[in-house]
Image (cartoon, rainbow, N blue to C red):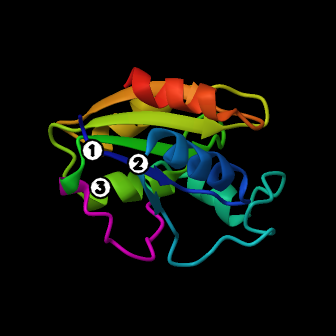
Amino acid sequence: MSKKLIAYFSASGTTAAVAKNLARAAEADLYEIRPEAPYTGADLNWQNKNSRSSLEMRDKSSRPALADADAHIEEYDTVFIGFPIWWYVAPTIINSFLEQYDFTGKKIVLFATSGGSGFGKAVAGLQPSAPGATIVEGAVLNGRPNEAKLKAFAEKY
């Protein structure tokens, strides 16, 4: 049996709730990907072209600083990475996280929360940040998926 990690970034708490439930259902460890400078409501205003999130997402080379680097990726075979969909892709802080560690030989399974869009080009946008890893598009887990659904999702990988 492989050891699994559920790593997640959550700006508003929605993805955090799903990640915590997924970790329980999968009997996996949990790790929060936290920005060094937490996002404020104003930072997340996607309607403001000058908000922090808008500026980061327009600049594909943006790499928001992480609050820490203690995920111990070397201990895991499979890493589930969760995030809210921003502009049809993963927030650039996910690239920051991937580039912080060596994921060579690891399987990365993406899961996301979204207000209405799918993964878009998330896998393509993340793969260069984790060379040597296999990244798979898992699922958009909106709402409150029950434990059975989350367990089945985790066991699929």
User: Which corner quadrant holds the N terminus?
Assistant: top left
What residue sits 80% from the left and 59% below the top?
A: 45
Task: Tell me the amino acid under the disc marked 1.
Answer: Lys
What residue sits 25% from the left and 56% below the top?
A: 73
- Quadrant in the picture for residue 63: bottom left
Q: In this view, does 101 lie above or below 6?
A: below
Q: Distance between the residues labelled 3 and 2?
A: 22 Å
Q: Name the residue under label 3.
A: 99
Taking the magenta stretch, the answer to whether it contains residue 66 is yes
Q: Left or right: 21 with respect to 151?
A: right
Q: How far apart are marks 1 and 3 (CA)?
A: 21 Å
- Quadrant in the picture for residue 101: bottom left
Q: Name the residue under label 2.
A: 28
- Where disc 2 sits, the SS reads loop
Instruction: Find out whether the residues at labels 1 and 2 contact each other: C-beta distance under 8 Å.
Output: yes
Give residue 5's position: percent from left, percent from top: 37, 49
- Please rate how many residues cluster around mark 1, counting C-alpha atoms within 10 Å: few if below 14, some from 14 to 19, many from 20: few
Q: Is residue 138 above or below residue 67?
A: above
Viewer-nearest of discs 1 and 3: 1
What residue sits 40% from the left and 33% below the top?
A: 109
Q: Which of marks 1 and 2 is nearer the N terminus?
A: 1
Q: Mark 1 points at which residue?
A: 3
Viewer-nearest of discs 3 and 2: 2
- Where disc 1 sits, the SS reads loop
* Magenta: main secondary structure: loop
Taking the magenta stretch, the answer to whether it contains residue 81 is no
Task: Tell me the amino acid under the disc marked 2.
Answer: Ala
Q: Earlier in the sequence, mark 3 or mark 2?
A: 2
Give residue 15's position: percent from left, percent from top: 65, 49
Task: Tell me the amino acid under the disc marked 3.
Answer: Glu
Please state the extent of the stretch shown in magenta in the rendering.
63-74
